[in-house]
Image (cartoon, rainbow, N blue to C red):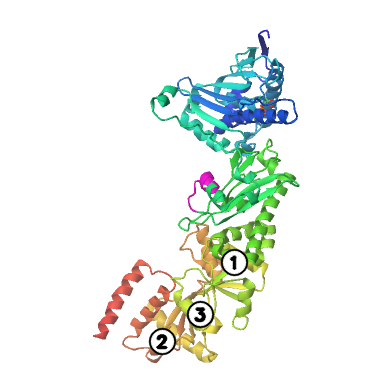
Amino acid sequence: MSNKKGSLSINSENIFPIIKKWLYSDHDIFLRELVSNACDAITKLRKLDMIGEFEEPEDNHYRVDVKVSPENKTIKVIDNGLGMTADEVEEYINQIAFSGAEDFLAKYKDKTNEDQIIGHFGLGFYSAFMVADKVTIQTLSYKEDAVPVYWECDGGTEFSMSDGERTERGTEITLYLGEDSVEFANEFRVREILNKYCSFMPEEIYFTNEDVKEEETEEKEEKPEEPKPINDTVPLWAKHPNECTEEEYKEFYRKVFMDFKEPLFWIHLNMDYPFNLKGILYFPKINYEYESIEGTIKLYNNQVFIADNIKEVIPEFLLLLKGVIDCPDLPLNVSRSALQNDGFVKKISDYITKKVADKLAGLCKTEKESYEKYWDDISPFIKFGCLKDEKFNKKMKDYILFKNLEKKYITLPEYLEAAKDKNENKVFYVTDEVVQSQYINMFKEQGMDAVYLTQNIDSAFITHLEQANQEVKFLRIDADVADTLTEEANEEEMKSMSETLGDIFKKALSKENLTIKVERLKNEGVSAMITLSEESRRMQEMMKMYNMGQDMDPAMFGMEGGETLILNANNRLVQYVIDQPEGEHTELICQHLYDLAQLSNRPLDAESMTKFIARSNEILGLLI
Ligand code: ADP
Ligand code: MG
């Protein structure tokens, strides 16, 4: 071949500075593009072999080599795939690839960062110029009598082509890294990028540092270790679920997510119709020390890593899980906003949701015991899914469990049925076992049940359940004195007692706004308790959540303070106050009863605590 020079048919003066600038944040994808091209070249040759157009030599071993030389600041990607003839380089590199890059830029150069295309697909070979000042290709086609080709381009719009030097079938691409990309002339950096993008590519990939000389290994007596590919060419998700063992699933999880806590269980997705989708979703064990759960779903396209947590494809609530999804049919060379509105992508996302719901429902039906065992860990995730996704909610609503006071798992209908005669349609719940223990004990004494709802998501979930079951009302166990806890009492008498005691307590506590109510509690041992109406508490929680002033008066929002001091007329201390409004110890008792009631509701503030301790000492003093 005579030497050839040419101009790349590109309108823009110089495409490369734009490529560099535009893709600023994700420069490392160049390696994914080159290595996946190398894998493609091998896969294509395997196909030619299958249809009889090529015969694989006896001693052939297909492989991709990535070599870095920190000294020369080069990265090479070498494959023994099908190679290219001069005509093919002309067609695929000079024309097609360039027009591909041009298209790409025309479409996306004006887009903002938020509107990135997924994983920057579409740039292909030319992404090399994001990091290289000069790129060369040495290639030899598999075709009989093929002549090797050399191609070179220094990042302008000019390229040159001539006869090449390659003697073996395949392609060697060399990147001469530019000044601002020397970070890639580093063994660890390159290995890191390979691990990120190429861990599951379908052909064996070997990585070496060219500057580490061979003799160094020979000096050692023992035989140098057999080099191993950096990737797993048949990832677990690509296998049929029947062929995978439990240990393999666990090991895959450890390796991919670097999480050494065992996952609870997993769902292996495997379908060919109506679209191709494979993947494994793991339910991680939740670490309660952390407030929020954070998962990772890795998205692949034919075993090539695209990106983590692409929320356009994966339902938002599934992003709490850990997993991998490989979907070759995904349209990736479109912008994210286009993906969002894509009917096909929506179908994929719906399918994943459906599969997850089916699996969970199935587990609940056939392996109730495991389901209950996992419940505490998986419930935040399921609840989040129900809140976020109506279809998921519909499928899961009968499989929502509640842990009751006996620590048994029951469903909402089961709870309502049991509470029917006592407190119809009221669901009492506990958010803090320690702080609310007094109430819990009273409930137990009266054969009443409540459920534990202790997770962050529960307050939103309660609202959701109330909307779905209009007649049902959720009440925190200290929101009100449940009917079952009180005895029948003379209303008139209670009213007048409330007035009398109200005056005494307000005076003793110097609290004019205190709301006081007298009840006859079945448990005589309880003197006083504080209830905070469900509405007021929810309002306060909401204000806190939105960071509105904590000392803001809820009355501003048309609510009363909502706190009521309940005094038990059956208790002998309360009786004492009624009998001796002017008694020697009346004031002391009032103050102390109020603090005790507060204590079983929330921690005392500093000033109250100081007074409480001093008063406790004073009371003990009365005993001697
Ligand atoms: P794509 O991979 O999407 O086709 P690229 O820009 O990555 O686009 O590559 C353009 C073309 O260049 C490929 O389709 C292929 O024909 C050719 N090519 C690139 N790298 C190689 C290689 N290592 N061996 C053989 N052909 C290659
Ligand atoms: Mg490519």
Q: Which residue is mark 2?
A: 574
- The crowd level at tag 1 (other Cα within 10 Å; few <14, some 14-19, many 20+) is some
- Depth-wise, is mark 1 or mark 3 nearer the camera? 3
Q: Are marks 1 and 3 in contact (CB under 8 Å)?
A: no
- Above/below status of 339 relative to 601: above
Of residues 266 and 64, the one nearer the viewer is: 64
Structural crowding at the residue carrying mark 2, measured as other residues with C-alpha within 10 Å and reported as few (<14), some (14–19) or many (≥20): many
Location of the N terminus (image quadrant): top right
Q: Which mark sits nearer the N-terminus, 2 or 1?
A: 1
Q: Residue at x 63, y 47 (%)?
A: 279
Looking at the rendered structure, which numbered label has been put on residue 443? Answer: 3
Q: Residue at x 48, y 50 (%)?
A: 260
First in sequence: mark 1 vs mark 3: 3
- Type of amino acid at the residue the image marks with label 3: Phe
Q: Position of residue 39 (x, y in %)?
A: 63, 30
The span shown in magenta is 252-261
Depth check, mark 3 against mark 2: the one in front is 3
Mark linked to residue 462: 1
- Mark 3 C-beta to ligand 2 under 8 Å: no
CA–CA distance in space, label 1 to label 3: 21 Å
Q: CA distance from mark 3 to mark 2?
A: 21 Å
Answer whether residue 597 is magenta in the image: no
Rendered view: 418 above or below 333: below
Q: Residue at x 49, y 89 (%)?
A: 496
Residue 28 seen in the current view? no
Check disc 3: other Cα within 10 Å, few if <14, some if 14-19, many if 20+: some
